[in-house]
Image: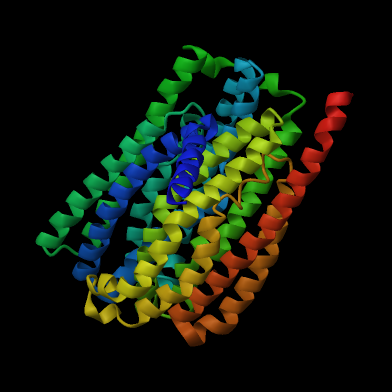
Amino acid sequence: MLRSIQAFFQSYLHRFLGNPLIKRLLRNASYLFSAQTISAALSFAQGVLAARTLGIAGIGQLEAIVQFSSNINRLTSFRMGELVVSYVGEFSEQDDPARAAAVYKLAAFFELSSSLLAFVLVVFLAPWGARFFVHEPALADLCIVYGVSILANAVTESSTGLLQYFDRFKRLASVTILQSVLTLALIIYAYISRGSLVYIVLAYLAGKIVWSSTVSIVALVEARRQWGRGWWKTPVTVLTGRFKELFRFAFNTNITGTITLMTRDSETLWLAGFTSPIQVGYYKIAKAIMNILVIPVNPLISTTFREIAREAARKQWANVRYLLRTGSTIAALYTIPASLGLVVFGRYVIGLYGIDFLPTSYYALMILLAGILADNILYWNRTVLLPLGHPVFPTIVHSIGAVLKIAGTILLVPQFGALGMAGLLSLFMFGTATILLARTLRVLADLESQVPQQEGA
């Protein structure tokens, strides 16, 4: 009996690891996983040192400064990485390098334009942001200084998408580690020298500039390798007939990104606006610990999206379903035990940042776990419908969720602070993930049912 069970699992594992889709998915994810695990450890050390240097209110102000510039950048962003993966992938599969190069060129141009707009907005809005979010008008100039990272980030989304599609995950991983090492070294210096908030902001800025500029340069080298020295001269007019589709894709990803910005990425700004830097500090630490769950799963998002885009272009719907099922299994095997570990040891981990963060940050972390379990296991829920031809539905779902969450923020956060924000995010993640799961399964069933008709046509 025992041998039969052992033989079954060995056979299943052999088939699982022998599948070329899963081998490629795991190989690429392993590069990013290794890099992001190392980066997470270094970021954890960065956070501990920054918190011990600045205290609860100081770490709250740091978060508000960083998120103020970052969220303005996200607001104008069209998430060109997803567009590049989808359409460079489609045209490459069709052996049409001219249109593939034109897509990357067009995406980079629009991303550059949106980045310049974002920086202008940061400069214009910095006095208001420093007063309303940082609660210190004198720090307006520091908001602008960190905003320089937007200029370095000018074509990073498009570049990242290009490197992902052409299977350059190892290079992305190397750059991620480089950024984390540099940032940690600068924060260690600030900690030893008892540096102020200015030193910590400059440390994060330096790491951001190194990562963004390096990724962009590596992508330009890759574009030349794939399409030749004069690829950038390819006229975008070769995309005539597809412009409407491309803009529709970009518009919907921008709307989805804006909704995600309003509901998830800008939470600390909402919290800062309605409460104080102290509540932001509590919440910042809870989300930093939550990254122990998120960061190892994040590499699966881009690698799975790449494989799904390839299989969708080939209309291999069974492979798409297999990728989703297997990816969720892999995510669950990590997320569930790690969540239990945080329940048991979360207090001790938070205590490393400083005893003053307890117990509020721990309670916020426990509330967040309910939502992150669903969102992590269904990590593909926000992007899978894009290559399946349904880019609008995620926008609708997130729009409704955003309205409800913003209403909840206005009603609950002023009274409950960090704990109220944690509860709202948890409900948002759980609700949107399960709704998009149901829709994805229905779409795949419809696509699979059309295959016999197409083959017989």
Residue 418, image x, y percentages: 44, 78
Q: Nearer the viewer, residue 394 or 242?
A: 394
Kindly give the residue lying farthest to the left in the view shown: 193
Residue 110 in view of the camera: no
Question: Whole-percent x and y of residue 220?
Answer: 43, 24
Total number of numbered labels?
Answer: 0
Is 144 left or right of 242, judged from the image as shown? left
Residue 366 in sight in this render: yes
Quarter assignment of residue 50: bottom left
- State how the image is colored: rainbow
Residue 336 in which image quadrant: bottom left
Given residues 288 and 8, the one toward you in this image is 8
Residue at the bottom extreme?
Answer: 415
Residue found at the far front of this picture: 1
Quadrant (top left/top right/bottom left/bottom right) for the C terminus: top right
Q: Does residue 450 appear to the left or right of 421 in the view shown?
A: right
Q: Residue at x 46, y 30 (%)?
A: 163
Residue ID at (45%, 41%): 10
Residue 289 screen position, x and y as percent: 35, 65
Q: Residue at x 55, y 45 (%)?
A: 326
Residue at x-position 65% and y-position 26%: 90
Q: Position of residue 47 (x, y in %)?
A: 27, 62
Question: Which residue is at the front of the view, 96 or 66?
Answer: 96
